[in-house]
Amino acid sequence: MVAAALEQIRLLESLDFDLIKISLKAFDVPTTIDAYRAIADKIPYPLHVGITEAGTPRTGIIRSAVGIGTLLWQGIGDTIRVSLTAPPLEEVAAAYEILKSLDLRQRGPVLVSCPTCGRTETDTVKLAEAVEKRLLKITKPIRVAVMGCVVNGPGEAKDADVGIACGKGRGVIFKKGKKVAVVEEKDFLEALMREVEGF
């Protein structure tokens, strides 16, 4: 792949054409990473990175995040494409999440949520999914936490701008790690979103 790309680059340069961007995308993540690493220091042109034909969102996002994320973390890549068997907006959303996870670009909220454990006394999964859906309409960069217990929740999500730590029947709303309100379970979603929208 690298040899073929270098041959094409030489051909374009021989024709006095130097507005070139290089893409060495493959389906196989290790092959893609190896190819970009091998060519990165050999050319002065921007690299367009991605994992091609990555699949449906469930597997394709993971494959893309591993491949694209590894390259970007190593400083390789100028533009990206997440290739999914899905509507194009899902590709864009996944790309932004990859960039946000590496602190390369801030656009929209980041949701922090716990995996739940034996201390969870409310449906944290349902709440986190509802919050995630509501966050899609927000463009400002804000870190929002949905935590399943009041024991570890505020501490584990202390870097969040706004969050909720859920307990049995009640939860604690916090901002920047400081408790600002106690709310009833029926009000978890709306109380948290009010704080998010007012932040």
Image (cartoon, grey):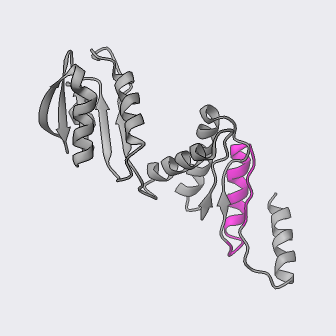
Quick check: 68 above or below 20? Answer: above
Give how far across and how far down residue 55 sits, in percent.
69, 37
What residue lies at 27% left-to-right and 35% top-to-bottom?
156
Q: Nearer the viewer, residue 119 or 110?
A: 110
Q: Nearer the viewer, residue 129 or 176?
A: 129
Quick check: 16 above or below 153? Answer: below
Q: Nearer the viewer, residue 49 or 189?
A: 189
Does the image show residue 158? no
Q: How many marks?
A: 0
Q: Quadrant of the N terminus?
A: bottom right
Numbered range of the magenta stretch: 22-45
Q: Nearer the viewer, residue 126 or 151?
A: 126
Outermost residue, bottom direction?
Answer: 16
What residue lies at 27% left-to-right and 16% top-to-bottom?
119
Give how far across and how far down residue 88 sits, in percent.
63, 46
The answer to whether 139 appears left or right of 179 in the picture is: right
Quick check: 41 above or below 155? Answer: below
The quarter holding residue 111 reads top left
What residue lies at 82% left-to-right and 85% top-to-bottom?
16
Q: Is residue 23 magenta?
A: yes
Does the image show residue 3? yes
Give how far across and how far down residue 134 sits, in percent.
38, 37
Give how far across and how far down residue 32 sits, in percent.
71, 51
Q: Is residue 162 magenta?
A: no
The quarter holding residue 24 reads bottom right
